[in-house]
Amino acid sequence: MRLLLSLAVLTLSLASVRADTPEEVFSKRIVPIFKSPNPSSCTQCHLSGVDLKDYIRPSHRETFLSLRDQGLVDLDHPEKSKILHLIDMGKDAKKATDIQQKNRTAEYEAFAAWVKASCADATLRTAPKLAATNLAKPAKPNEVIRHARTDRVMESFENTVWALRFRCASCHTTEAVEKRAKEKPLESLGANMAWIRPTAEETLAYLTKSRLVDAKNPERSLLLLKPLNDEIKHGGGVKFVVGDQGYKAYRSFVDDYAAVVNGMYAKSDELPKKLNVVQFGTQSWLKIQNTPPAWADKYMAVKLYAWDTTTKKWQANPVATTDRKVWGGGKLWQHNLTLLTTPDSADAKKWKTATPTLPGGKYLVKVYLDATDRLAKDWKAELSDDDFVGEAVVESQWPTGYGKMTVLDATAVKK
């Protein structure tokens, strides 16, 4: 009896040893991840381009060597391996679902146990390197994978749609809709009218879940078509024209978002060019009155340059810009300003949490006119020096509000 008990204990001990070998851990804990039809926890932080399965080969040996050769495993400190860090990156995300957190925990624990067991195997540690063609990694280059991260998508949204939301805020915030609902039935205002939510994160989540952004046909997104007030009527009238700053911002975002979620980017040179400028919409308005007949009903853009009191010159880069079509019948052009600065500037950091404002002072206003309607034919086109019609100096404290516009007479605009 004692002999049988001893044999049983020995058998259990041997089984435990075998279960701790890299092969056993890989078979029981990594292979199920590899074979699972469900996406990995990578999808919490990446909208496309990468999945944990991309790093797994059919055998435990090839998988370990592939990770080792790419610097994703720390042989001496397996618990500090980069592959574990990558899996664990989203653990503190506030918006992670219970399922995502559960998947991440299971993946992390499985890889941690297997990496630890593999790093303890001398034959694996010293095995020859795999051929480059046998390395397991995502098919997309790192630049494309990073571009599809949710934080990068949010950064793009903040500098496009969110930055220019003031063009739509008078009607489309939740507060504006609630106010209008007191005057007429809420259903008559449209199901998605209150699309501007209190934060950029909430707004992006709402837009991508509603029918306002069409990821399959981005150019057909209602977020673009409604403000044009052409093919689809818009209760607020014309807010965009094809090729203007608002249309460019919204269109560039929906096109990029669709390309990301549909995995359309294959190479880094296909990604949108990253501009070293960020935008912040304001409620400071500029009005140019008594516009000449040649400007009537044409798209017009202005750039504002600040006076540098140190150099006694106009600054080289514009600090604000805005655009709109000239109202020919009223001989009038007016719109609110969008401030421009660099991503790491003090202003950029301040304006992310505080109201963006243009300091009072003297500014050079440069005026550009799309006399040939070029932008309507190509929304990506930009006005150039050939479209310059003149400039004027204006001094203002830039008060905010539609009824407190800074006014410039068109007769003062000279080449």
Image (cartoon, rainbow, N blue to C red):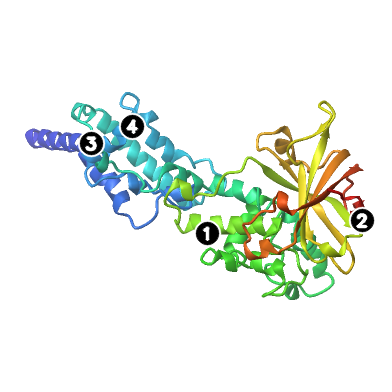
- Residue position for label 3: 130
Residue found at x 35% / y 34%:
72
Q: Secondary structure at mark 4?
A: loop
Q: Which mark is residue 403?
A: 2
Q: Which mark is residue 73?
A: 4
Looking at this view, is 300 or 339 the one in front?
300
**Viewer-nearest of discs 4 and 1:** 1
Q: Which mark is residue 258?
A: 1
Where, by quadrant of the figure, is residue 75 drawn?
A: top left
**Viewer-nearest of discs 2 and 4:** 2
Along the horizontal axis of the image, is 143 left or right of 171?
left
Disc nearer the start of the sequence (1/2): 1
Q: Secondary structure at mark 1?
A: helix
Quarter of the figure with the N terminus: top left
Say if 306 sits above or below 180 in the image.
above
Looking at this view, is 404 or 353 the one in front?
404
Mark 3 vs 4: CB contact within 8 A:
no
Disc nearer the start of the sequence (2/3): 3
Q: Secondary structure at mark 3?
A: loop
Looking at the rendered structure, the kind of residue marked 1 is Ala
Disc nearer the start of the sequence (3/4): 4
Q: Position of residue 49 (x, y in %)?
A: 42, 50
| Distance in Å between CA atoms under marks 4 and 1 | 34 Å
Dot 1 crowding, Cα within 10 Å, few <14, some 14–19, many 20+: some
Looking at the rendered structure, the kind of residue marked 2 is Gly
Looking at this view, is 348 or 285 the one in front?
285
Disc nearer the start of the sequence (1/3): 3
Dot 4 crowding, Cα within 10 Å, few <14, some 14–19, many 20+: many
Say if 97 sits above or below 214 in the image.
above
Q: Position of residue 81 (x, y in %)?
A: 37, 31
| Distance in Å between CA atoms under marks 1 and 3 | 36 Å
Mark 2 vs 3: CB contact within 8 A:
no
